[in-house]
Image (cartoon, rainbow, N blue to C red):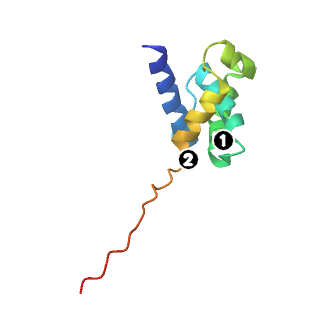
Amino acid sequence: MTSRDEERELLERCTAAARGLAVAGNQREANVFRLAAMILSPNLPVESRRLMVASELYFAEHPDHLVPSVDVVRNGWIIGLPRLRDMLTAQLRPQDPVPVKLERRPRQS
């Protein structure tokens, strides 16, 4: 599995957790969910809370697996905070409809 595949899989897991459909299954996911919750909270508070709960459930059983946020990047679990934020926001934010320019048809006589 390539690093892009791993990133895509982790993004899918984060998206599922943010929608309330998954909880963290390992240390990496729990720490990434926690960090994602922190960076999404201003713009997506509901999804942020779900991510935090998904990580807290894991840490309740494995408190020694919690690492400082900076170690999530150092360990290579994510590429960077801006990338994680932007990719998750794109997945979670409702898509705006494409504007359509309506033109009036000339009246038929």
Residue 32 visible, this orientation = yes
Closer to the camera, 35 or 26? 35
Using the image, tell me which numbered label, if any, was put on residue 48: 1
Q: Amino acid at mark 2?
A: Arg
Q: Position of residue 65 (x, y in %)?
A: 69, 18
Q: State the quadrant of the C terminus.
A: bottom left
Vertical relation: 19 (above or below) 87? below
Q: Callout 2 environment at 10 Å: few (<14), some (14 to 19), or many (20+)?
A: few
> Going from the N terminus, do you reach mark 2 or mark 1 first?
1
Q: Nearer the viewer, mark 2 or mark 1?
A: 2
Residue located at (56% from left, 47% from top): 93
Residue occupied by mark 2: 93
At a point 44% along the width and 13% down the height, the residue shown is 2
Compared with 52, 109 (above or below) is below
Which quadrant holds residue 100? bottom left
Q: Which residue shows up at 60% across the image and 35% down it?
A: 86
Residue type at mark 1: give it: Ser
